[in-house]
Amino acid sequence: MDLHSNYIIHLADNALILGHRNSEWTGHGPILEQDIALSNIALDLIGQARNFYQLAASRINELEPGEIITEDDLAYLRDGNEFRNFILVEQPNGDWAKTILRQFYFSSFQLMQFRELLKSQNVELAAISEKSIKETRYHVKWSSEWVIRLGDGTSESHLRMLNAQQDLYPYIDELFIPSDFDYEAESSGAGILPEKLKDEWFQRINSTFETATLPMISEEKKAMHILSGKNGVHSEHLGFLLAEMQFLQRAYPGCAW
Amino acid sequence: MESKPHSENWPLWEVFIRARQGLDHKHAGSLYAADVQMAIENARDVYTRRNEGISIWVVESKNIHASNPEDAEEFFDPANDKVYRHPSFYHLPDQVKNI
């Protein structure tokens, strides 16, 4: 598979995996209204994933004639080491605070990423970004307000946000470490190197943390880079997620409803 | 959702949705939310997922003052036999539309 296809699949995988994680809350949300809110975000993300997978599939079919692949093949019939999503988005839901913070981290990143992709030389990528950025703007608004509500809430909710900050800290670095498909995207004008978004991301995150009376995070402390989701080296959690998500297609190939 | 702490801690809000430009906001229902921002967003997620609206109002239910059902007799019955209060006895010229 060529690098640009991998770049598109990376965008798709992030959206699909986080969408799936969020869907695990459906029916289990803390209150009915927020259950629906998070399920809506899950649907937005899975919709974005579909657009990216369709784009990737048509590109792959063009470049590698032969067996035609579809969006479903990409979502349901790849193994863990072929997924290109961030380690961050495959992390288990934990409590509400961790789910919120994971969403806030990712959506803040995705918002800047889509903003840059509006200028992509790949016009279809630009078009998907234009459609998706409205959704992502809402995801950032929703999750940042929850970060403030919990951080500046009770001592219990504050503590839970502190724990979430700790839990997710090791997965931040990966957002900004370029993979070979990022370099290709940068040089072809299709995308942008993620490290260019780094300073702005930390500023945005920390400004919300300040309002939420939470400690700021810094980019000084480096995590250990044993894992790299973008290169297919995932945490143990992805395997379990895929086992559940892909079960039906694997057990009943071609099953539709 | 076995525990329901929100119904004790979170206020109830009434939601009004305007379906289109030029129409009035109509009462859509009610929901729980911790603050006004959450109430508007909850209303967005619960009541406008299928293109039902372009504008949302929320108001805390405690701020709505209602007539008392026990007062219904003196409030509403006296209007029953005063048909002359309705503009039913005017003849409208044919040229007049939209009334």
Image: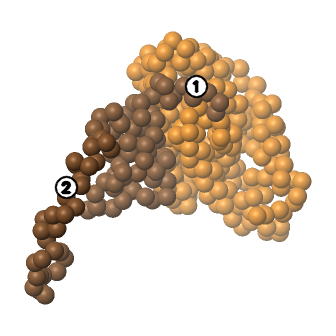
| Display colour for chain A | orange
In the foreground, A23 or B83? B83
In the rendered structure, find residue A97 and report the number of the disc placed on it.
1
Label 2 amino acid? Pro
The residue lying at 68 percent from left, 50 percent from top is A9
The residue lying at 57 percent from left, 50 percent from top is A44
Q: Position of residue A201 (x, y in %)?
A: 49, 31
In the foreground, B31 or A240? B31
Q: Chain of mark 2?
A: B
Q: Is residue A186 left or right of residue B75?
A: right
- Secondary structure beneath dot 1 equals helix
Would you place residue A122 above or below residue A228 in this image?
below
Would you place residue A163 above or below residue B66 in this image?
above
In the foreground, A188 or A229? A229
Quadrant in which residue A243 is drawn: top right
Q: Position of residue B48 (x, y in %)?
A: 45, 53
Would you place residue B42 above or below residue A151 in this image?
below
The residue lying at 83 percent from left, 62 percent from top is A255
In this view, the residue farthest toward the right is: A251
Q: Position of residue A2 (x, y in %)?
A: 73, 54
In the rendered structure, find residue B78 and report the number of the disc placed on it.
2
Chain coloured brown: which letter?
Answer: B
In the foreground, A30 or B63? B63
Image quarter (top left, top right, bottom left or bottom right) of the N terminus of chain B: top right
Asked whether residue B18 is in view, the answer is: yes
Asked whether residue A110 is in view, the answer is: no
- Secondary structure beneath dot 2 equals helix
